[in-house]
Amino acid sequence: MSIEQILSAKIGDIMTTKVIRIDVNMTALQVAKLIVKHEIEGFPVTENERPIGIVTGWDLLTKVVAKGLNPNEVKVKEIMTSSPITCSPNDSILEVAKLMVKHGIKRVPVVNNNKIVGIFTPYDITLYRRIIHYADFSH
C-alpha cells in the first residue's frame, strides 16, 4: 500500500471509538484521576453530548497546579480549551493531520451529527501504519 493510499484513508476507519467524555462541570481533580486511571492525556469536554472543549493534563498542570489552585474546586469549564477543532469520520488522514500540525494539537474529536463518535490522535496514525505494513503481503 502506497503512502498516498494510507493518507487518503478515512478517519472513521482508524479512529479510536472508545472515547471518555468529560462533563463541563467535573472538577480538575476528577479529570486528573481519569488521566491516571485510563492512562489518557486528554479528553473531549461535552455539554448535552455536544463537544464544547478539550481538557488535557497540560491544562491541569499549567492552569491549576502551577497556580496553586485547589483541583477539587476548579471546574473543567474554567480550564478547558473551548471550541475544539473537530473532524468528520469521512475526512482523510491527510486532511486531519494537516489540521493538527497547523493548530499544534494532538487530539481531534471525530463528530457526526453534533455527537462525538471517536477521537483521532497521532497514535492512531502510528497503529494504522504498523497494521498496513505487516498486512501488506505484496512484497
Image: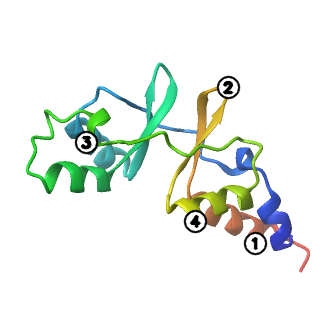
Marks 1/3: CA distance?
36 Å
Where is residue 54 shown, x and y percent of the image? 42, 43
Mark 2 near mark 1, Cβ–Cβ under 8 Å? no
Specify which label sits upstream in the sequence, 1 or 3: 3
Where is residue 15 shown, x and y percent of the image? 64, 48
Eye-nearest disc, 2 or 1: 2
Mark 3 near mark 2, Cβ–Cβ under 8 Å? no
Specify which label sits upstream in the sequence, 2 or 1: 2
Q: Which numbered dot is residue 101?
A: 4
Marks 4/2: CA distance?
25 Å
Specify which label sits upstream in the sequence, 4 or 2: 4
Q: Label 3 amino acid?
A: Lys
* Depth check, front residue: 128 or 87: 87
Seen in the picture, residue 94 relative to 47 is either above or below; the reply is: below
Residue sitting at x 12%, y 53%? 67
Q: Which residue is mark 2?
A: 113
| Residue 122 seen | no
Eye-nearest disc, 1 or 3: 3
Q: Residues within 10 Å of mark 3 (few under 14, many from 20)?
A: few
Specify which label sits upstream in the sequence, 4 or 3: 3
Where is residue 110 shown, x and y percent of the image? 62, 41
The colouring scheme, among rainbow, by chain, secondary structure or one colour, is rainbow
Q: Residues within 10 Å of mark 4 (few under 14, many from 20)?
A: few
Eye-nearest disc, 3 or 2: 2
State the SS at label 1: helix
Q: Which residue is mark 3?
A: 33
Mark 4 near mark 3, Cβ–Cβ under 8 Å? no
Which residue is the extreme one toward the bottom? 139
Q: Which numbered dot is residue 133?
A: 1
Q: Is residue 21 left or right of residue 123?
A: left
